[in-house]
Image (cartoon, rainbow, N blue to C red):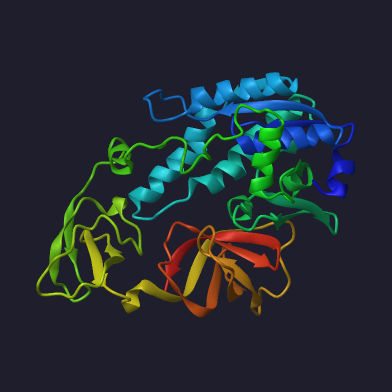
Amino acid sequence: MSRSEVSHVANKRVILGLSGGVDSAVAAILLQRAGADVQALHMTNWEDDDGYCTAADDLQDARNVCEQLGIPLHNANFSKQYRDQVFEYFLAEYRAGRTPNPDVLCNRDIKFGVFRDYAKRLGGDLLATGHYARSETVDGHGALFKGADRGKDQSYFLHAVNAEALSETVFPLGDTQKSEVRRIARDSGLTVHDKKDSTGICFIGERPFRKFLSTYLPANPGPMRTPRGEDMGRHQGLMYYTLGQRQGLGIGGRNDHGEEPWYVVGKDLDDNVLVVAQGEHEMLFSDWLIGTDTSWIGVAPDGLAAGLRCTAKIRYRQADQNCVVTALEDSRVKVRFDERQKAVAPGQFVVFYDQNRCLGGSVIHEIG
């Protein structure tokens, strides 16, 4: 933690979101070292016990961490809110042939929404999580910055959290490298010091994605065709594919084509056609995109009417891309990139940055 964060949390009650993983466990240690009155809050977002979701094991790990560190543990069930505000959105986006990112909504509506409200009822002065990001107050507003560990920076997933919530939040791991987190956990004797990082979405876990999705949305197989209309086989359902996808197409070894890989380059929802092309096809690349439901952290930046020069990411862990963002009507923006972008997927988020500061983001709606 930075010196300013240490002074910020000293002698204050901090409600820490404790997942049961190593990151939030070490966040608890750092908060204790800074003199905070730490209480842990573990949330349950998914209740289906089918052997894939690790919610029960995570709760037990959270209990063990709290016992080792001597901090109280609260447990709250937000599964109804999660289904209503995140999971239904997830299904609606796939139904529309898009590729959603529910982690962004989970942060905005659950962790920094109903979770934050619950933390206040516990008497919390501040909220803390194990995210690799940094929060500061700039010109009287909460602001979000990239974490010091650029390989773990999670500001992309936090871009829709509002400034008020950020002003009441501390990220203890913001200035810490992941390797240091593991070392602190090991030296402190935490049982989770070598626990594998969670990947993907909790409600899917390690289960086959297509099998999971088909239990909620009926599969609708159809033809796979090239942009010129050449028949290349059958797809299992447009919802199972995303633009730029290479694996799982079942195309290969055809004598009438070369050995270059095949990619998904489009979806024809009206005729239920998956459009595929070989190699670095022009349909894989976009010069611009239209974003909807744009959210800015605090006050919208100056210069949007004429075009704001900044950087953006169209996916997590992508290097920052130079672009110009122009405001349109109805919370829409047009983003024009200096260099063509590969595999821009509608439904995902484009997130904007001014150097290390995250400005906000938008849902990718249209590409061209």
Left or right: residue 119 compared with residue 365: right
Q: How many marks?
A: 0
Coordinates of residue 102 in the picture (x, y in percent): 49, 46
| Residue furthest front in the image | 187
- On-image quarter of the N terminus: top right
Q: Position of residue 47 (x, y in %)?
A: 46, 24
**What's the residue at 71%, 38% (across, down)?**
184
Depth check, front residue: 246 or 359: 246
Residue 125 makes an appearance in the image: no
Residue under the point 35% across and 58% down: 242
Quarter of the image where the C terminus is located: bottom left
For residue 6, what is the image quadrant? top right
Most extreme residue toward the left is: 255
Quick one: 54 or 49, which is closer to the camera? Answer: 54
The x, y position of residue 93, in whole percent, is 40, 50
Along the viewing direction, whichever of 310 and 200 lies nearer the viewer: 200
Vertical relation: 162 (above or below) 66: below
In the image, is 101 to the left or to the right of 168? left
